Image (cartoon, rainbow, N blue to C red):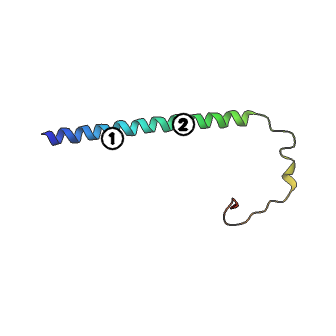
Amino acid sequence: MTSTVFWIAAAAIVVLFAAWRLRRANHTLTTILREERDHTDLEPAPGAYDTADEPVSHKPGRHRKRH
């Protein structure tokens, strides 16, 4: 009987922890998306898209240079 109560309590704790983590992740995602939406609502700086005629170099491999 006591082992059943233990497993039910353990399962309840796991469920509560998972729900708490999902709620925090949802809040974080909402914040990030709101900031991105606010950032894209701003008008681009003058000359921000003037480099569209320049060729773009595409190389396979890592995108960031190691320093």
Q: Is residue 7 left or right of residue 48?
A: left
Tell me the tag on residue 36.
Answer: none
User: How busy is the neighbourhood of tag 1: few (under 14 within 10 Å), some, or many (20 plus)?
Assistant: few
Query: From what the image shows, is residue 51 above or below residue 43?
Result: below
| Rendered location of residue 3, percent (x, y) | 16, 42
Q: Secondary structure at mark 1?
A: helix
| Rendered location of residue 48, percent (x, y) | 83, 44
User: How busy is the neighbourhood of tag 2: few (under 14 within 10 Å), some, or many (20 plus)?
Assistant: few
Say what amino acid the circle numbered 1 marks. Answer: Val
Say what amino acid the circle numbered 2 marks. Answer: Thr
Give the quadrant of residue 20: top left
What residue do we see at 40% from left, 36% from top?
19
Query: From what the image shows, is residue 67 above or below residue 17?
Result: below
| Rendered location of residue 11, percent (x, y) | 28, 41
| Rendered location of residue 33, percent (x, y) | 61, 37
What residue do we see at 70% from left, 61% from top?
65
Q: Which residue does the numbered mark 2 point to in the structure image? A: 28
Toward the viewer: 52 or 17? 17
Of all residues, the one furthest to the front in this rendering is 67
Q: Is residue 36 left or right of residue 10?
A: right
Q: Which residue does the numbered mark 1 point to in the structure image? A: 14
